[in-house]
Image: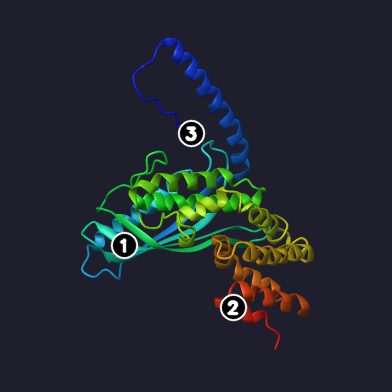
Amino acid sequence: MFVKTIGEKPRKRTVINGMGIILRCLSVWLIAAAGVFSLSARDINATVKVRSDAVHGSNKQLFTSLEEALSSFINGRRWSDLSGEPSETIHCNFTLLVTEALSDRSFRGELYVQARRPAGSVSRETPMLNIRDQQIEFNYAAYQPLSFDPHFVEDNLTATVAFYVYLVLGLTADADVLMSGTPFFRAMEQIAAAAQPYGWRGWERERSSRSRAVVAATFNDGSAEDFRKMWFRYHASGIDLLSANPADGRENMVSAVALIASLQEEQPGSVLISLFGDAKLEELTLLLSNGNRVEKRQAYQTLRKIYPTRGTLLDTLREN
């Protein structure tokens, strides 16, 4: 938290009273934050790639510089905990595909983000996020360092990257401890609000847009509560339990199908449906393919209605 003093120096009594209020609020925040972050301390270990093959005749050194700057920006800070305590690493891939040069320093492209976390006590990882953002526009000059202040957003690229880092952290925290991702989802909402005055693509508030602002709003307006609880059960009582108790672990993971089906009925088109499908459908289908005939048939019929375009993947559950 940052506290900013605005205006001229007031009278001494006002300063003392004001500082007392600030210190009390700060103390409360630090106690709450310590409770959350001690459970969800994470380091981001990102592999960053910038692909610019579609932009002919451009300065390739600029994109090499951008790749290095993005890698330093993501990996060079502690996003979730500044206490210095040991943390668990989240492995991520950030791939920026530059599709168009609007000028020498202005570009348009797509951002692909994949993230995964360790699953239980075995040497296995489970996906947290697999997303493609096609609404990226940014400015960059060669050798320009990248910085970010959530209280003073002025650059679309770093705001977007920071947004997805916090989304990864929020989903990972929720997978470990029930509803503990809230501080990270709040950070996403703060970034989305700060980006609004600029009119950048990808931050629209219309629900139909499935924009970053919509993702942030969904995780913060209460409509994602059941989804977040399911997300926790899927991981803490499901995927993390598979090695010790495969039957119970599989049962808890399969329960996710019913929740996604209910979400489809109550909130058709919710960003949570596509977020879950893009990250988890392959993993879930692989698990269900080892189930009995009844489980596979029921899952196939339900999931095919929710994800009609994923038929090739879901056909592995289909009985011949």
In the depicted structure, whether residue 312 falls above or below residue 132: below
Q: Which residue is labeled 1 in the image? A: 108
Q: Which residue is labeled 2 in the image? A: 313
Q: Amino acid at mark 1?
A: Arg
Q: Quadrant of the C terminus?
A: bottom right
Specify whether 178 is left or right of 98.
right
The front one of 314 and 199 is 199
Q: CA distance from mark 2 to mark 1?
A: 31 Å
Q: Amino acid at mark 3?
A: Met
Q: Earlier in the sequence, mark 2 or mark 1?
A: 1
Picture residue at 60% right of the left edge, 62% below the top: 267
User: Circle 1 — which element?
Assistant: strand
Q: Earlier in the sequence, mark 2 or mark 3?
A: 3
Q: Earlier in the sequence, mark 3 or mark 1?
A: 3
Q: Which residue is labeled 3 in the image? A: 1
- Res 42 visible: yes
Residue 26 in the image: x percent, y percent?
A: 53, 27
The front one of 93 and 184 is 184
Picture residue at 66% right of the left edge, 67% below the top: 261
Picture residue at 67% right of the left edge, 64% below the top: 262
User: Circle 3 — which element?
Assistant: loop
- Res 292 visible: no
Residue 80 in the image: x percent, y percent?
A: 52, 43
In the figure, residue 121 lies in which quadrant?
A: bottom right
Q: CA distance from mark 3 to mark 1?
A: 33 Å
Residue 111 in the image: x percent, y percent?
A: 41, 62
